Image: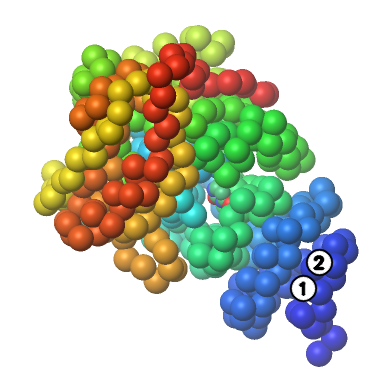
Amino acid sequence: MSFLPAEIIKKKRNGGELTSDEIEEFILGYARGSIPDYQMSALLMAIFFKGMTKEETLGLTKAMLHSGEVVDFSSVKGFKVDKHSTGGVGDKTSLILGPIVAAAGAPVPMISGRGLGHTGGTLDKLEAIPGFNTQKPLPEFIELVRKNNICFIGQTKEICPADKKIYALRDVTATVESLPLICASIMSKKLAEGIDGLVLDVKYGSGAFMKTPALAEELAVNLMNIAKGYGKKVTSLLTNMDQPLGRYAGNSLEVDECVAIMKNEKFIGPQGYDLYEDTRELSLRLSAHMLLLAGIGKTEEESYQIALETLTSGKALAKFEELCKIHGGDLRNVPKPKYSMKITSEKSGFIQGFHTEAIGVAGILIKAGRAQTTDIIAPTAGIEFHAKVGDEVKSGDTLFTLHGDDQDLLASAVPMLKSAINISLQKVSKPSLILKVLS
Ligand code: URA
């Protein structure tokens, strides 16, 4: 055997540059099962520490993309557009913007991921809806997008099988926060979808993989260069993940939040403002950019108004109900948590910030996310947020509520959540949701 995986691992470990043939052989070997998890884990860790050049990142993306098929959407009319987020806590916008954009006229074929590290995943959220099946064969995926303008699936044996395996492995080997690995994971999935355009929601802050706006911008530029190299239209939004998005993080709770928003409901929290507002606004802004790429609306504002009308008229909700139906999901029976546990403030002052990653880890402790690839998610487990950065709280006010079906697990997450908030007497202004748009 001329190809020795340990030699490739050693080369990367020593800071060498891998050739595209070496990358391809390793990735395809892993996808087919001839390279075991322990060697892939070692290579991932070497990439994590030593990074990759632009050429290596492109080679990795290509190898992952061609580990499966590229969907041929030539039978589906219209500009196929999708959105992908680099990952956050309470980041549930796909469930709202997919239906908005599909109902407004652009086909949305979405290949999504599960929770990754401390962040949530669209597939896990959708699977909190009883019966919702995200594993569809390719011909059915194409047919559903043709008929309904929308379908959500996960990486499969046919589409991006390498990402399916590597994604699950990164999740449990602390190898998520790596620019080349994130780039290749996202772009291989998105290029395999056969889309015409892509909106990237690139998150920065304490709950994102990229902790600063500068790192997030670097990731956005890399992602966009790959997309453009494949002839795709692309826009990136740099958005704030220094605090969780919306009212809830946790799968069935996030589905409830999305449905409430699509029903035009508000949830006025103890601070006197609507705790759904940031989820709603980000979903609308991302929808507007997707519609703009698809030529539905001539300016961002015109596309925004189309998205808004589609949401407020109930058309997005009707599309979401249709989506649940085609995937076999029973939206009327989304499970509710049995227990809840409040966490109150031990002092008075202003919320300076959150350690949002720790909130995501608290979510894993209560089984809203996975600690091991084989872990089963508890769909009702989650965290409710009652106040956000800049809010004034008094000692004894509720900051978080833990929800779920296992009281011992909920109790185990309390110390982590208590340490995830910073309160002091200094007044702070509220952060803006969207920092920058790159197109
Ligand atoms: N989303 C993905 O699909 N992959 C990553 O690596 C990070 C976010």
Asked whether residue 197 is in view, the answer is no
Left or right, 315 with respect to 84, comes to left
Q: Nearer the viewer, residue 336 or 214?
A: 214
**Residue at position x 78%, y 58% in the image:** 50
In the displayed structure, would residue 331 be above or below residue 18? above
Left or right, 90 with respect to 59, comes to left
Q: Nearer the viewer, residue 74 or 320?
A: 320
In the displayed structure, would residue 271 be above or below residue 190? above
> What residue is pinned by disc 2?
12
Residue furthest bottom in the image: 1
> What residue is pinned by disc 1?
9
| Element type at mark 2 | helix
Q: Give yes or no for contact between labels 1 and 2 (Cβ–Cβ under 8 Å).
A: yes
Left or right, 82 with respect to 39, comes to left
Asked whether residue 43 is in view, the answer is yes
**Residue at position x 57%, y 34% in the image:** 204
| Element type at mark 1 | helix
Q: Nearer the viewer, residue 162 or 178?
A: 178
Q: Nearer the viewer, residue 163 or 429?
A: 429
Q: Is mark 1 within 8 Å of ligand 1?
A: no
Q: Quadrant of residue 167?
A: bottom right
Q: Position of residue 182 (x, y in %)?
A: 63, 50
**Residue at position x 37%, y 16% in the image:** 308
Quadrant where the image shows the N terminus: bottom right
- Give the residue type that dot 2 points to: Lys
Q: Quadrant of residue 384?
A: top left
Q: Position of residue 230 (x, y in %)?
A: 73, 42
**Residue at position x 61%, y 59% in the image:** 175
Sort mark 1 into few (<14), some (14-19) or many (20+) by Cα contacts within 10 Å: many
Q: Position of residue 200 (x, y in %)?
A: 58, 34
- Give the residue type that dot 1 points to: Ile
